[in-house]
């Protein structure tokens, strides 16, 4: 065995020596015909796949084909190999056009258009253009769908009542609204599906207000059909309108009118009720507000427009309505003539959404303190004993489709514009109120007002519930103090006593008889009677008929007093200007002095019978400016008297400046004029303050001034026309002289009788002596 391996080794050594001996050329060359020539190594596959072989003298090198790479640019079979280049990651952005994707291949790559795009050659380049699927495949979205092409794709838009199955790229199919929706029509409605829609059929006594895709709700048409409500004047038409609207909705009547027509009829009927002046009690006002609100709830869902406004002069209505399967959201603002309502659709919808929602505002333009003055609840912020309230805003009814408005989740804000901005500047108190019909038959109440802000022009009231609302102005009466009461009693008593002496003087003093004295006599009689009535009956307001009579008598006698003052001015003018025939016929005196005031009182009573008597005084009311039936004639008389006095004084000055003036006569006339002017100032000044006193916001200062001037008039007339008159003083002296002599004579006779009877027993008959004293 060992011998065998030895021979093999010797053979290999011999072959090596033979090879060396045969080739003496360097590496890379080979011997040919005794010469060494270059060996072409590329003849064999030495570079591997995807490589190119390049022969050189005595050697070779390899390079990768395009799309491949190696670690070195040139390599040999032992130093490297070619691997594929991924062009999509190396230079993808610039390699492929827009809306395409790059796909790598062995040694290269491809640009493939994205789905929804196709190849398009533009010149020498290729781009990927959008495919309009809506044109190429018209039935993609089905019969009821609308195809909308987008970049690289499309969308199927389905109308109401249809939907895509799965995604927006599938055809539109009908929605069966009645399937699985148990309450789509309510518990008393029957749902019927149709292609792309559905409709609800309501059972008798129920309605969906003309919208057959909303829930059926109960209708109680007899809610307002009561005898007490129909007994209110002019309310029958309003209740009949409610019944007609309700019956047409419930299916019991074939007559079906549009919501706009019903709203117009409602405003016309409401205007008739307001202009009729029948809302003079709490019960009638409660019926009125309730009927309007319930009728509006029937009309609002039947309106075709989203926003409706109607105004017939007496009543204004603003409504905004939304009808959809989904409840509306966002704020709601209704801006009427003088009132603005701010709320939200959340408040209007409430907990149960019947398929519609509305917000309504009804503005009663002609409803004011003249035709409605109901009581005010004690829970009002400005409530005070004997406080008088006036409406300082227009009255409105605010309502929403949500019937549960007793406790709203969000406050509702009403912004009112003041009727009398001038009254606000006086610092009077105001209250935001609503009509509480369940409280004492109906009162204005401030309960539920969560915030109230007032400025010179507007009042902002926020409420936690809905009803009929307004802004009240509180007029607090001043308290008659002890001093004022006694000044009034003592002052008027003194004035009455002085006027009584004046009447006696003008009646029985023969030396001063004449036209002026007659005028003064009737002036004093009028003031005497007026002051007695004023002293004892001005505050007796319990009996309305009696109070009205007192007010009418005061109206007459005070106007008569001013009329006789005017006659005095005319008489003084005639005495200065005319030389002869300066007297006035008594028939003319009575016609002007009593006839004109009587005519004014009769006309005033016929025009506004309830104008006599107020809640505080038996005097003329401020409503409808009735007080001007007194102040207007007084102002005219003061103006005319002032004119006559100015002309009279001017003529007196001319006569004093003449060559031969009759000084005694002129001085006497001057005295007459001065007393008449002073008399006009006192009586006129009294009613300047009386103008403010007898208004509802009269102050204590005005009461003192009025009482002072009222007390001075009788005293002043007595001083000027009696004590300052020389003739009257002489008559007084004669009268007192006769009285003193008579007293002395009686006293002397009484003393003599007492002496002669001193021995007689006493008898119980002293009354004669007392009467003599």
Image: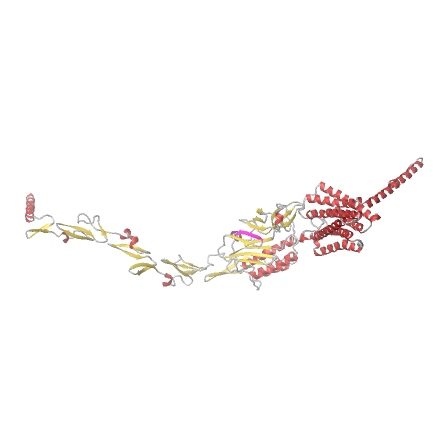
**Left or right for 60, reference 186:** left
Q: Quadrant of the C terminus?
A: top right
Q: Quadrant of the N terminus?
A: top left
Residue at image position (25%, 55%) is: 108
Residue 475 x, y percent position in the rendering: 65, 47
Tally of marks: 0
- Asked whether 188 falls inside the magenta stretch, the response is no
Residue 511 x, y percent position in the rendering: 84, 48
Residue 687 x, y percent position in the rendering: 71, 48
Q: Is residue 758 above or below residue 345?
A: above
Residue 186 visible at all = no
Residue 477 x, y percent position in the rendering: 67, 45
- Residue farthest to the bottom, as pictured: 254
Residue closest to the eye, 204 or 320: 320
| Main SS of residues in magenta | strand
Residue 171: quarter of image: bottom left
- Residue range in magenta is 338-346
């Amino acid at each position: 065995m060992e011998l065998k391996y030895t021979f093999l080794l010797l053979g290999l050594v011999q072959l090596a020596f033979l090879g060396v001996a045969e080739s003496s050329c360097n590496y890379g060359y080979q011997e040919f015909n005794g010469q060494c020539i270059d060996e072409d190594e590329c003849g064999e596959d030495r570079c591997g796949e995807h490589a190119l072989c390049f022969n050189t003298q005595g050697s070779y090198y390899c390079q990768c084909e395009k799309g491949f790479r190696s670690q070195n640019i040139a390599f040999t079979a032992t130093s490297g190999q070619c691997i594929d280049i991924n062009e999509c990651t190396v230079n993808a952005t610039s390699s492929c056009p827009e809306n395409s994707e790059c796909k790598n291949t062995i040694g290269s790559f491809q640009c493939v258009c994205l789905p929804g795009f196709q190849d398009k050659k533009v010149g020498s380049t290729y781009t990927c253009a959008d495919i309009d699927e809506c044109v190429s495949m018209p039935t993609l979205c089905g019969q009821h769908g609308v195809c909308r092409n987008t970049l690289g794709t499309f969308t199927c838009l389905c109308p109401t009542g249809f939907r895509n199955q799965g995604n927006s790229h599938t055809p539109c199919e009908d929605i069966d609204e009645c399937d699985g929706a148990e309450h789509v029509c309510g518990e008393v409605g029957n749902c019927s599906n149709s292609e792309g829609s559905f409709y609800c059929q309501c059972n008798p006594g129920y309605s969906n207000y003309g919208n057959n895709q909303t829930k059926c709700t109960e209708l109680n048409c007899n809610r307002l059909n009561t005898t007490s409500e129909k007994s209110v004047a002019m309310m029958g038409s309003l209740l009949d309108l409610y019944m007609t609207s309700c019956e047409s909705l419930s299916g019991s009547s074939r007559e079906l009118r549009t919501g706009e027509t019903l709203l117009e009829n409602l405003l016309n009927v409401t205007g008739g009720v307001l202009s009729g002046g029948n809302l003079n009690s709490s019960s009638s006002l409660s019926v009125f507000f309730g009927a309007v609100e319930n009728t509006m709830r029937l009309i609002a869902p039947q309106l075709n427009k989203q926003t409706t406004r109607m105004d017939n002069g007496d009543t204004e209505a603003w409504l905004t309505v939304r009808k959809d399967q989904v409840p509306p959201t966002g704020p709601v603002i209704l801006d009427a003539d003088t009132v603005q309502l701010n709320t939200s659709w959340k408040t209007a919808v409430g907990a149960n959404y019947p398929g519609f929602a509305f917000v309504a505002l009804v503005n009663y333009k002609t409803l004011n303190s003249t035709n409605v003055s109901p009581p005010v609840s004690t829970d009002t912020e400005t409530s005070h004993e004997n406080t008088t309230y006036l409406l300082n805003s227009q009255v409105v009814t605010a309502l929403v489709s949500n019937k549960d408005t007793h406790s709203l989740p969000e406050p509702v804000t009403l912004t009112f514009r003041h009727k009398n901005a001038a009254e606000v500047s006086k610092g009077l108190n105001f209250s935001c109120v609503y009509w509480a019909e369940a409280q004492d038959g109906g009162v204005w109440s401030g309960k539920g007002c969560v915030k109230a802000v007032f400025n010179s022009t507007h009042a902002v009231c926020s409420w936690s519930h809905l009803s009929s609302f307004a802004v009240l102005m509180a007029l607090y009466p001043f308290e008659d103090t002890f001093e004022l009461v006694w000044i009034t009693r003592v002052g008027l008593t003194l004035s009455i006593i002085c006027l009584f002496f004046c009447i006696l003087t003008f009646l029985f003093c023969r030396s001063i008889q004449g036209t002026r004295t007659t005028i003064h006599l009737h002036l004093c009689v009028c003031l005497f009677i007026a002051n007695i009535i004023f002293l004892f009956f001005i505050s007796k307001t319990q009996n309305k008929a009696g109070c009205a009579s007192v007010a009418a008598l005061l109206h007459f006698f005070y106007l008569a007093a001013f009329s006789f003052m005017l006659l005095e001015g005319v008489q003084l003018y005639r005495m200065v200007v005319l030389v002869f025939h300066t007297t006035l016929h008594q028939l003319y005196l009575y016609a002007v002095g009593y006839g004109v005031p009587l005519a004014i009182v009769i006309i005033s009573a016929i025009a506004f019978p309830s104008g006599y008597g107020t809640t505080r005084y038996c005097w003329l009311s401020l409503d409808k400016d009735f007080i001007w039936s007194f102040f207007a004639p007084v102002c005219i008389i003061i103006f005319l008297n002032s004119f006559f006095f100015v002309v009279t004084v001017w003529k007196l000055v001319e006569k004093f400046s003449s060559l031969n003036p009759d000084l005694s006569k002129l001085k006497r006339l001057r005295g007459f004029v001065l007393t008449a002017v002073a008399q006009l100032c006192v009586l006129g000044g009294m009613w300047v303050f009386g103008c403010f006193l007898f208004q509802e916001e009269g102050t204590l200062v005005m009461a003192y001034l009025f009482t002072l001037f009222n007390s001075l008039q009788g005293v002043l007339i007595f001083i000027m026309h009696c004590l300052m008159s020389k003739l009257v003083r002489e008559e007084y002296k004669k009268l007192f002289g006769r009285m003193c002599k008579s007293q002395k004579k009686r006293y002397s006779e009484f003393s003599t009788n007492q002496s002669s009877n001193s021995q007689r027993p006493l008898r119980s008959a002293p009354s004669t002596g007392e009467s003599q004293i």
